[in-house]
Image (cartoon, rainbow, N blue to C red):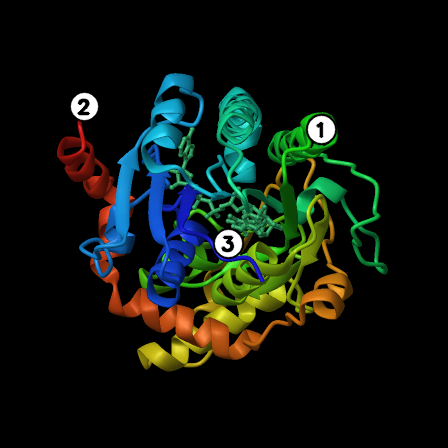
């Protein structure tokens, strides 16, 4: 089993990243370096409970900045890079595709290049570059079937095209230079601290505030939902035991049509907020569909289950209930991220 002295986590202030940072600080002895640009999606308020830990360092910077990355590798000498930093929201990629190319493609290649130079120069014993990616690279499924690691790539949104490109570069650096890499492609995550532009936190926030609930198209698109802490456990298993050069699919075996999921959220929130049954459902509005909206995603995660013994532990109802409770207990967080106040504060704190 691999062990690491220093783990460089990119995108650690984002939704999944903050759960990764917290888990590794609490469960590993390693030094954790969180490198994040703090875009609108990066929020250090996610990490106030661990920010004073002796093993934790935050560095603000962009993965497209070569000299900044070279300094970080020279100073901290990471033996594991967990690369999560990305532009992650499909709707934004439809409006501003070039930002996705800049961070997800150019940023990833820049990071690979700096990592490769560092690895070649210093030859650390157990170096690993772990690239965290998405099931959206595989395209869209019909009514049946699952994405496996062998499914050909067929990205259909600017977001998934940028992530597919980054995956190809990671494999190319392994094939061409021998850089030790491992990849995973995961389905839709949900849980605390997710920016409220994504379906589940957006619905929770709008139900809480008695606003309209916008469901795209006919609401019958299917996603495979995974509680974020289950994703973190899968990442830990892959970092420790994943075979070099391999890819692992991660999914929740938890397929639901969007409208079914929104109904569940409505009913759970009505109950938790003590409102009359059916009141939230009454605010559902079917709105114009997302351009190029992928119909169905579903993951075959038998490889990671068989090789690494991972499987999802949190059932959807339990995960949704925990997620809703977190948002209801953290309305300040919601107000801050929707007003942008956290960004002004931390931009000033880490300016220069
Ligand atoms: P997120 O948008 O919540 O967070 C992204 C983080 O990256 C933010 O903290 C942001 O500040 C940082 N970042 C963005 N551009 C940067 C740059 N140029 N340099 C440095 N930092 C930068 O995203 P997320 O949902 O936490 O996703 C994390 C990773 O996991 C992404 O690579 C995403 O593609 C992948 N993924 C996400 C899901 C999901 O359901 N959310 C599922 C599968 C895979
Ligand atoms: O599959 C993994 C991917 O899951 C990750 O790679 C992405 O980073 C992550 O954002 C997520 O992408 P989706 O596009 O599936 O997630 P989103 O929450 O944006 O939308 C989920 C579904 O809900 C999708 O079918 C679109 C629909 N939707 C979304 C929003 C924001 C609505 O119907 N209404 C909405 O307001």
**Could one spot residue 275 in this view of the protein?**
no
Mark 3 or 2 closer to N-term? 3
* Tag of residue 352: 2
Quarter of the image containing the C terminus?
Answer: top left
Query: Nearer the viewer's eye, disc 1 or disc 3?
Result: 1
**How would you rate the neighbour count of disc 2 (Cα within 10 Å): few for under 14, some for 14-19, many for 20 or more?**
few
Mark 1 or 2 closer to N-term? 1
Mark 1 or 3 closer to N-term? 1
Residue corresponding to mark 1: 172
Query: Nearer the viewer's eye, disc 1 or disc 2?
Result: 1
Number of residue marks: 3
Say if disc 3 is inside 8 Å of ligand 2: yes
Splitting the image into 4 quarters, where does residue 330 fall?
Answer: bottom left
Q: Residue at x 84, y 53 (%)?
A: 142
Kind of element beneath mark 3: helix
- The Cα atoms of the two marked residues, 1 and 2, are separated by 35 Å
């Amino acid at each position: 089993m691999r062990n690491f002295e220093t783990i460089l986590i990119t995108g650690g202030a984002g939704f999944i990243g903050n759960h990764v940072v917290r888990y590794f600080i609490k469960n590993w002895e390693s030094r954790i370096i969180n490198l994040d640009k703090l875009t609108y999606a990066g929020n250090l308020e996610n990490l106030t409970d661990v920010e004073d830990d002796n093993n934790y360092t935050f560095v603000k910077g962009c993965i497209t900045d070569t000299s900044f990355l070279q300094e970080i590798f020279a100073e901290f000498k990471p033996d594991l890079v967990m690369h999560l930093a990305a532009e992650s929201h499909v709707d934004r990629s439809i409006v501003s595709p070039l930002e996705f190319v800049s961070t997800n493609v150019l940023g990833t290649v820049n990071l690979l290049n700096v990592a490769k130079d560092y690895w070649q120069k210093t030859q650390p014993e157990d170096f690993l570059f772990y690239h965290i990616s998405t099931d959206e690279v595989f395209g869209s499924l019909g009514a049946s079937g699952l994405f496996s690691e062998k499914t050909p790539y067929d990205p259909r949104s600017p977001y998934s095209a940028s992530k597919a490109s980054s995956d190809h570069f990671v494999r190319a650096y392994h094939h061409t230079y021998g850089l030790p890499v491992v990849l995973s492609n995961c389905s839709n995550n949900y849980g605390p601290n997710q920016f409220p532009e994504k379906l589940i936190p957006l619905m929770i926030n709008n139900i809480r505030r008695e606003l309209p609930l916008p469901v795209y198209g006919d609401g019958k698109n299917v996603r495979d939902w995974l509680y974020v802490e289950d994703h973190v456990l899968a990442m830990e298993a892959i970092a420790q035991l994943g075979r070099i050069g391999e890819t692992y699919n991660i999914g929740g075996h938890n397929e639901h049509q969007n409208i079914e999921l929104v109904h569940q959220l409505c009913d759970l929130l009505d109950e938790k907020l003590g409102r009359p049954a059916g009141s939230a459902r009454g605010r559902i509005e079917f709105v114009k569909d997302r351009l190029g909206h992928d119909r169905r995603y579903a993951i075959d995660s038998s490889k990671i289950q068989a090789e690494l013994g991972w499987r999802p532990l949190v059932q959807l109802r339990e995960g949704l209930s925990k997620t809703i409770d977190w948002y209801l207990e953290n309305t300040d967080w919601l107000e801050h991220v929707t007003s942008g106040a956290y960004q002004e504060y931390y931009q000033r704190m880490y300016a220069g």
